């Protein structure tokens, strides 16, 4: 698949590939209306103020990325560019990378990062796990997130200005934020900080029904009941609702086990086995 | 059969008229419609029916009748009732749960019951003037006409989906019919057929019966029900069902209570001032006053909102502008437009004409400083809230501290200061769970019970209220001390687990190459490669490695500006430990050089003194802790304190003269750190860093980020700062360590025995939780002496 290119600072730059979530795997967005409204409002901007750049904070698996996919979907044609944060990201990684060219007529190819690509095209840039990026690398974001809305890249030798439609959002796990890992100069530019909490049972059930309705059909309610019993047994001392990821992984494994064992439909024992496989350590710990 | 009359909803059924006000709960617009129908000569009803069970309606009417002497309703009083139902579709799951846990449903944890069975153990009906049902009952009492509760009395919690409907303010109190037509299909999205259909059948059957007996009836209930009620009213096969007027109904079991403002705001329409404005301008419906109706109709919530916002700006920016160094203020001034824009955008997205309080706070927290959000919350929460001064016999229902999860957890605080078990809540008239929403940064002024007194009076009070037994002194309650010690040890372990450990590379990269350690190894000539691993290092805490460094607990950092919150200290006098140290001369020298007192812990929070009755039982006071730093383990006796002080050369805790001011002055003088100018969470950690030798463990709420000042302090002092989130600990334990009781100890027991009456009152033996603390730590004083002797 050929990548799109852009001319920035007189150089031909290859743009990153936008991400299109697989709709069949994504399912419907269930719940989270308040958060979706807040992000939409933050992104609206106006004549007098620029769009804001929200930061999603929550435990792993609560559905932060899912929310961003939904927002991108709701915004129609606007492409979504995802940058995965980790400890080894450098400031230049956030702007542009260079590689030896396969084209004999050129020495190097310039590749715009997902952030730079989103800025140029007017897409959405989503930095996942932003708190894992070291502060010195994040310094580059300062000019993107304030009224300047540009980044300067030494490699390109030019400035990438944000298109009017450019929108920014980032996410981090709650635990990564403890200990001031996100420097103040970035934190103060990321607003609003939105806490993504756990969902109520009705929503978790809806998510499973939406995804597995064709597979589980009439056993849906009884399997969900088994799941909840096992979950509460596991968490009896300090009940904590499951995340959508917890439940989706579990039902995925249960359906795979049923396939593998040649069961016509997912049986209770498939779900119980899946549960024991995934939470084996916790169950043992609990029993001890 | 039916006609629509003007802007009102009126049905003609078999010669009778039914005026309906399908309403959004706790919304002034609909209360006004009810008021208007009852006031106007051509619509005034012969009887009123409300969407509430008969017993609930009776109880509500009785209380409103008592309150009728007051022109305005005290806000907010409520009726609470035990909920006995779970939905029938959950029966199988309920049976399995009982089987699995081997317990009755009543004995299962409330979190499991709520999340699995959607069961709230309490239902609440707040008597807010903003609600159309409350207004209807008030009108029935004022007009002296029959009143009927036509809903079912007992219902399970409904599963509720959020439905976005148009802001009711758009009707301007007039076009109800059009509003209902525009919004009913959206409101119906929030219906729960399993629960609501049964209720609607009952409501319609009872309404049909009433329509036979009265010429003109007013009915008010939820907007989401109205579509189905209309359909059912037309069905001839749904027979009328007899219903008793409230005066003939048997009384039910209800608890009258005061609703804490932080919970009450959900029942005050968009914000308290608007609800107050409506009730203030409302007059009795038994006198016709066209002018008055119109004056209420033109109440503009937007102008009220503008007024409060303007007041906040003036107060906040003017009060703070004298402080030119205030960076936050300058930032807030610059970013005011961003706040206003975000708020305006939120209103557009949420279809609001005027923002409600949670939305206002959400926008402020998303764009302005914490201080501004607090100032805004203070102004919008300004209201003449009812307190237990007016109703000393009533318990207060309030949100439980440290909410987690999507549903709101609540508790009762009783007049004697004790608190109930926590429970989940639904609303009595629509059975929808109360959800935990945006956290409002407003500190409730501590509601004082008659037994409480100010700090100024405590000495006199104590003299007058000595317990009925000989006491030695007053000490903190040991079970809580043992618990926080055990949790502090856990916190240190958790912090360690979250750190990296370097291990020799043996084939797996684990969490990546540890370059520094590898380079050092090459410098040493070992030529070994090291990798980082998060998981392997999990040493058992033992006496050898425990170094008694300070531990800071920040439990509630978001209420730092509250008036009731104050500094307090747990201190001892050096002279009292003199007999326990090996070198009394050195102690004397330290006393002369540094001061007469040593600090075991500095604490921030609110202290309340117990009533005479409770003091007689042996409980002196209660301290609600927002944050605390421990220098010396809380359960230590003077003997152990002496061993600690001497063992660490009098360097691991502050030693000073005087009270808290003396402590701050000492630190300012010796270390150049002014603890009074920073927020208290920062001050606590800075204090800990000064006296730490290797590390400071800080436990903070999730999402709370320590200020960079403390990281800078730690870096300079070469102290490791270990931060652990509160969520690592069970909620009930966090709640338990958040309250510190001071209890009288029995005379002749060296301060180690506590009265049985105190144990009974506090619900546990004084040695409860002792097993949680390692024995070597319980006896550490002796161990230290041995170490220092050798």
Image: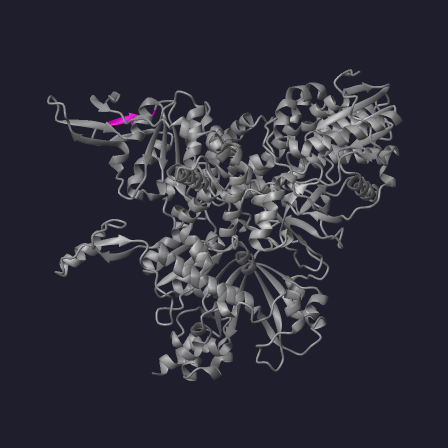
In-image side of B378 versus A13 (left or right): right
In-image side of B51 versus A128 (left or right): right
Q: Which quadrant does the C terminus of chain A fall into?
A: bottom left
Task: Say how many tags the image has.
Answer: 0
In-image side of B381 versus B132 (left or right): left
Q: Which residues are magenta?
A: A158-162
Height in image: B492 above or below B347? below
**Coloration of the structure image:** one colour
How far from the left and from the top, in percent, is residue B679?
A: 48, 52
What residue is at 60 percent from the left and 53 percent from the top?
Answer: B108
How far from the left and from the top, in percent, is residue A56?
A: 43, 38
How far from the left and from the top, in percent, is residue B289?
A: 84, 26
Height in image: A230 above or below A19? below
Q: Does the magenta-highlighted stretch encompass residue A161?
A: yes
How far from the left and from the top, in percent, is residue A76?
A: 42, 21
Residue B342 seen in this snapshot: yes
Closest to the observer, B261 or B780: B780
In-image side of A159 versus B207 (left or right): left
Residue B592 seen in this snapshot: no
Snapshot quadrant of residue B250: top right
Q: Does the magenta-highlighted stretch encompass residue B569?
A: no
Snapshot quadrant of residue A156: top left
Closest to the observer, A182 or B163: B163
Q: Main secondary structure of the magenta part?
A: strand
Q: Which quadrant does the N terminus of chain A fall into?
A: top left
Closest to the observer, B623 or A237: A237
């Amino acid at each position: 698949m050929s990548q799109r290119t852009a001319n920035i600072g007189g150089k031909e730059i290859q743009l990153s590939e936008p991400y299109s979530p697989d709709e069949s795997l994504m399912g419907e967005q269930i719940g989270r209306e308040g958060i979706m409204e807040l992000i939409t409002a933050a992104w609206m901007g106006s004549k007098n103020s620029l769009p804001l750049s929200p930061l999603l904070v929550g435990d792993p698996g609560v559905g932060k990325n899912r929310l961003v996919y939904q927002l991108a979907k709701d915004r129609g044609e606007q492409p979504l560019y995802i940058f995965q944060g980790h400890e080894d990201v450098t400031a230049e990684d956030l702007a542009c990378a260079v590689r030896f060219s396969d084209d004999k007529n050129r020495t190097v190819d310039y590749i715009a990062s997902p952030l730079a690509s989103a800025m140029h095209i007017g897409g959405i840039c989503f930095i996942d796990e932003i708190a894992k990026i070291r502060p010195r690398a994040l310094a580059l974001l300062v000019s993107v997130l304030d009224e300047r809305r540009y980044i300067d890249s030494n490699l390109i030798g030019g400035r990438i200005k944000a298109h009017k439609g450019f929108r920014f959002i980032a996410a981090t796990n709650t635990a990564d934020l403890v200990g001031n890992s996100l420097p103040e100069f970035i934190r103060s530019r990321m607003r609003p900080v939105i806490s993504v909490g756990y969902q109520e049972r009705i929503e978790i059930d809806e998510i499973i029904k939406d995804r597995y309705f064709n597979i589980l059909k009439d056993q849906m309610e009884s399997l969900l009941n088994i799941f909840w019993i096992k979950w509460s047994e596991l968490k009896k001392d300090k009940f904590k609702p499951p995340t959508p990821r917890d439940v989706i992984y579990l039902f995925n494994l249960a359906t795979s086990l049923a396939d593998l064992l040649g069961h016509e439909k997912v049986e209770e024992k498939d779900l119980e086995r899946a549960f024991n496989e995934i939470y084996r350590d916790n169950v043992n710990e609990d029993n001890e | 059969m039916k006609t629509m009359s003007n802007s009102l909803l009126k049905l003609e059924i078999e010669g009778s008229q039914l005026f309906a006000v399908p309403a959004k709960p706790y919304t002034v617009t609909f209360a006004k419609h009810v008021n208007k129908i009852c006031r106007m000569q051509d619509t005034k009803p012969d009887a009123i029916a409300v969407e509430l069970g008969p017993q609930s309606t009776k109880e509500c009417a009785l209380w409103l009748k008592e309150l009728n002497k007051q022109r305005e309703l005290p806000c907010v009083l409520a009726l609470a009732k035990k909920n006995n139902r779970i939905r029938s579709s959950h029966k199988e799951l309920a049976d399995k749960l009982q089987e699995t846990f081997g317990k009755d449903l009543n004995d299962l944890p409330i979190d499991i019951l709520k999340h699995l069975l959607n069961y709230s153990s309490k239902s609440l009906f707040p008597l807010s003037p903003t609600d159309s049902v409350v207004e209807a009952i008030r009108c029935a009492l004022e007009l002296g006409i029959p009143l009927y509760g036509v809903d079912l009395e007992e219902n399970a919690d409904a599963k509720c989906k959020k439905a976005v409907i148009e802001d009711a303010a758009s009707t301007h109190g007039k076009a109800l019919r059009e509003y209902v037509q525009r919004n009913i299909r959206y409101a119906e999205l929030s219906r729960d057929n399993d629960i609501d259909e049964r209720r609607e059948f009952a409501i319609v059957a009872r309404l049909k019966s009433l329509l036979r007996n009265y010429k003109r009836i007013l009915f008010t209930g939820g907007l989401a029900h109205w579509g189905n009620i209309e359909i059912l009213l037309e069905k001839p096969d749904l027979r009328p069902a007899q219903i008793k007027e409230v005066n003939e109904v048997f009384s039910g079991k209800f608890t009258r209570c005061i609703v804490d403002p932080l919970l009450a705001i959900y029942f005050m329409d968009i914000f308290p001032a608007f609800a107050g404005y409506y009730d203030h301008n409302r007059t009795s419906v038994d006198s016709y006053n066209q002018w008055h109706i119109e004056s209420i109709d033109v109440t503009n919530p937007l102008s009220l909102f503008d007024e409060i916002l303007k007041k906040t700006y003036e107060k906040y920016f003017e009060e703070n502008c004298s402080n030119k160094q205030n960076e936050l203020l300058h930032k807030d001034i610059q970013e005011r437009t961003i706040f206003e824009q975000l708020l305006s955008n939120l209103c557009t997205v949420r279809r609001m004409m005027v923002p409600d309080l949670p939305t206002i706070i959400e926008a402020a927290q998303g764009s302005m400083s914490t201080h501004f959000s607090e100032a805004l919350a203070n102004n919008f929460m300004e209201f003449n809230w009812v307190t237990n001064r007016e109703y000393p016999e009533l318990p207060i229902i309030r949100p439980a501290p440290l909410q987690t999860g999507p549903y709101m957890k609540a508790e009762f605080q009783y007049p004697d200061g004790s608190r109930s078990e926590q429970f989940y809540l639904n609303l009595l008239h629509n059975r929808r769970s109360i959800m935990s929403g945006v956290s409002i940064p407003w500190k409730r002024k501590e509601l004082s019970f008659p037994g409480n007194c100010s700090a100024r009076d405590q000495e006199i009070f104590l003299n007058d209220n000595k317990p009925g037994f000989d006491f030695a002194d007053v000490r903190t309650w040991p079970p809580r001390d043992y618990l926080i010690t055990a949790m502090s040890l856990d916190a240190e372990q958790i912090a360690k687990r979250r750190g990296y450990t370097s291990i020799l590379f043996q084939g797996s990269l684990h969490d990546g190459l540890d370059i520094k350690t590898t380079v050092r190894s090459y410098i040493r000539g070992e030529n070994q490669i090291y990798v980082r691993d998060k998981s392997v290092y999990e040493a058992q805490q033992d006496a050898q490695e425990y170094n008694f460094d300070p531990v800071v607990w920040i439990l509630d950092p978001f209420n730092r500006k509250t008036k009731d919150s104050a500094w307090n200290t747990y201190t001892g006098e050096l002279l009292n430990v003199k007999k326990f140290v090996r070198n009394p001369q050195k102690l004397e020298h330290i006393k002369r050089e540094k001061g007469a007192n040593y600090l075991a812990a500095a604490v921030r929070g609110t202290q309340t003194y117990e009533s005479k009755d409770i003091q007689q039982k042996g409980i002196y006071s209660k301290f609600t802790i927002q944050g605390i730093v421990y220098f010396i383990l809380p359960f230590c006796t003077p003997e152990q304190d002496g061993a600690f002080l001497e063992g660490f050369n009098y360097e691991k805790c502050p030693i000073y003269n005087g009270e808290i001011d003396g402590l701050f002055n000492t630190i300012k003088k010796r270390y150049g750190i002014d603890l009074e100018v920073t927020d208290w969470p920062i001050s606590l950690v800075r204090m800990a860093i000064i006296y730490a030798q290797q590390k400071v463990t800080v436990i903070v709420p999730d999402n709370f980020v320590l200020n960079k000042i403390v990281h800078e302090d730690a870096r300079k002092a070469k102290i490791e700062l270990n931060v652990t989130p509160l969520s690592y600990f069970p909620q009930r334990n966090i709640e338990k360590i958040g309250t510190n009781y001071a209890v009288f100890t029995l005379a002749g027991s060296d301060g180690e025995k506590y009265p049985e009456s105190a144990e009974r009152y506090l619900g546990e033996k004084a040695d409860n939780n002792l097993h949680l603390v390692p024995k070597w730590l319980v006896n550490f004083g002796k161990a230290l002496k041995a170490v220092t002797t050798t």
